[in-house]
Image (cartoon, grey):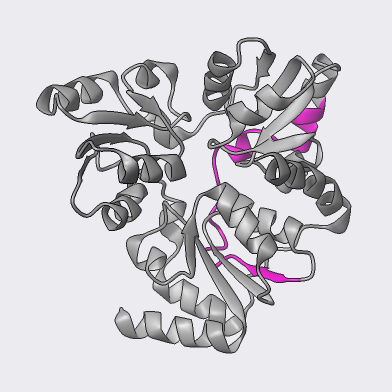
Amino acid sequence: MIEIQKRIREIAKAKDMLILAHSYQPPEIQDTADIVADSLELARRSRDSKAKKIILCGVKFMAESASILNPDKKVILPAHDAGCPMADMIDADQLREEKRKHPNAVVVAYVNSSAEVKAESDLCCTSANAAKLVASLEEDEILFVPDQYLGSWVAEQVPSKKIHLYPGFCPIHQRFTEEDILRIKGENPDAVVLCHPEAPPRIRRFADKILSTSQMIRHAQSSSETRFIILTETGIAHPLAKACPEKQFIFPDSRIKCANMGKTTLENLLEACETEELEIKVPENIRVRAEKALERMIALG
């Protein structure tokens, strides 16, 4: 494994490639990447990088976002079939139909969406900045797509807005059960519960804090608490352990894993660096419209 990682870094340096990895990627991928971050930071870092090529270790919508923000750079997705079930729950036609139902609403698209959906939206958001962005809007009526649960959490945080929810969701966060949460809390009564806002309200109600992946890591670092129950995808265990090796992180169910995030391997990352064949390129007529929504997110976020 170490030899493959070394070879990947050598090729990336020689070809002026920036390797980005999401915080849910396998540990060996995170340890090989130049930058490990959440969706918002990956978008920022891809846009601000001077590298000629970007290797995005994540899922398709993340690589699309990098392509949207970097039309002159080559963006490569090593796991070319790594999609996002939530993003697939809405397409441009479906969003246009929702817009017809709510003609006065501002469309806020979770970044976990396709380029085509972003192009039909007024601005994008991440789980880290969704409530802040919605609160900052002058308009009072919002159409939030595609995650109904993140949207419902935003509605709780910003009750002054009328928020229409599209019925999409993350299947991974749907897997948590109230029984598992009650069991793990009973076994660890002193642990602080951190939950991702993609989780349904029935799970969020057990949380001490609702936080995005990046916010969970920062909170764990700054908190005086030493034991945490984590209610999100288990890939976050690796960056949490690296950031806070002296603290304990407890996961109710080790099977809460995103299969698509797990599709990136050192072998296909090496192949992507060598061949540069798995490029993600957003058509220009879609890119220029989607860029406005992403840039607005970055500017406000």
Q: Is residue 86 magenta?
A: yes
State whether residue 60 appears in this view: no
Q: Is residue 146 above or below residue 55?
A: above
Q: Is residue 41 magenta?
A: no
Q: Which image quadrant: the C terminus? A: top right
Residue 101, picture quadrant: top right
Q: Which residues are magenta?
A: 73-96
Residue 105, picture quadrant: top right
Residue 276's spot in the image, x, y percent? 62, 78
Q: Judge by depth and name the residue closer to the eye, 45 or 90.
A: 45
- Furthest-left residue in view? 187
| Residue for point 57% across, 89% down | 14
| Residue for point 40% across, 66% down | 29
State whether residue 258 appears in this view: yes
In the image, taking residue 48 as reference, residue 246 lies left or right, namely: left
Residue 209's spot in the image, x, y percent? 37, 26
Q: Which image quadrant: the N terminus? A: bottom left
Q: How many marks?
A: 0
Residue 281's spot in the image, x, y percent? 74, 63
| Residue for point 61% across, 40% down | 87
Q: Judge by depth and name the residue closer to the eye, 158 or 166.
A: 158
Residue 144's spot in the image, x, y percent? 67, 25
| Residue for point 31% across, 81% down | 2
